[in-house]
Amino acid sequence: MKNNSYLFFKVLSTELRAKIIDLLYQKPRTVSQITKELNTDQSKISHNLQKLSLCNIVTSKRKGKTKIYSLNKKTITPILDLVNKHFCTLCVKECKAKEEYK
């Protein structure tokens, strides 16, 4: 039987999901907005949002016919805040390199 942390990180383990999470960390977005910003097929975005939603990493709310996706503010946003703090404090060279690519 696999442990919870393994299953949690497995959900996050694709590059596309990481990019989606990065975008949603900045602000909520629709599938169309994510598709346009990542220049990826809408079906791939929708599939990956579904996987992220199954673990409540991503939540959605309806506004008319449109679904707006955001990160789970209770759990995932604080985790990402800690990851960013850890990365920029303890992975100084990588953090500086990341800033150069912005």
Image (cartoon, grey):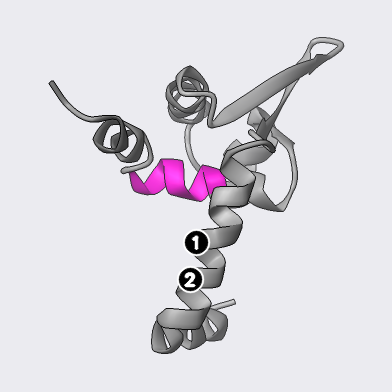
Circle 2/circle 1 CB separation < 8 Å: yes
Q: Out of 3 and 42, give the one closest to the viewer.
A: 3
**Looking at the image, residue 12 lies above or below residue 88:** above
Question: Is residue 58 found left or right of 9 in the rendered image?
Answer: right
Element marked by disc 1: helix
**Looking at the image, residue 67 lies above or below residue 71:** above
Element marked by disc 2: helix
Which residue is the site of mark 1?
Answer: 83
Is residue 12 visible to the viewer in this orientation of the structure? Answer: yes
Q: Main secondary structure of the magenta part?
A: helix
Residue 102 rendering spot, x and y as whole percentages: 59, 76
Q: Which residues are magenta?
A: 14-21
Q: Residue at x 72, y 36 (%)?
A: 29
Residue 11 rendering spot, x and y as whole percentages: 35, 33
**Quadrant housing residue 24:** top right
Residue extending farthest right: 64
Q: Where residue 97 is drawn, which disc sits there? A: none
Residue 81 rendering spot, x and y as whole percentages: 60, 58
> Disc 1 marks which amino acid?
Val
Q: Out of 20 and 86, give the one closest to the viewer.
A: 86
Q: Out of 96 and 30, give the one closest to the viewer.
A: 96
**Looking at the image, residue 69 lies above or below residue 36:** above
**Quadrant housing residue 94:** bottom left
Q: Residue at x 50, y 87 (%)?
A: 96
Q: Where residue 86 is drawn, which disc sits there? A: 2
> Disc 2 marks which amino acid?
His
Q: Residue at x 54, y 86 (%)?
A: 100
Residue 63 rendering spot, x and y as whole percentages: 85, 16
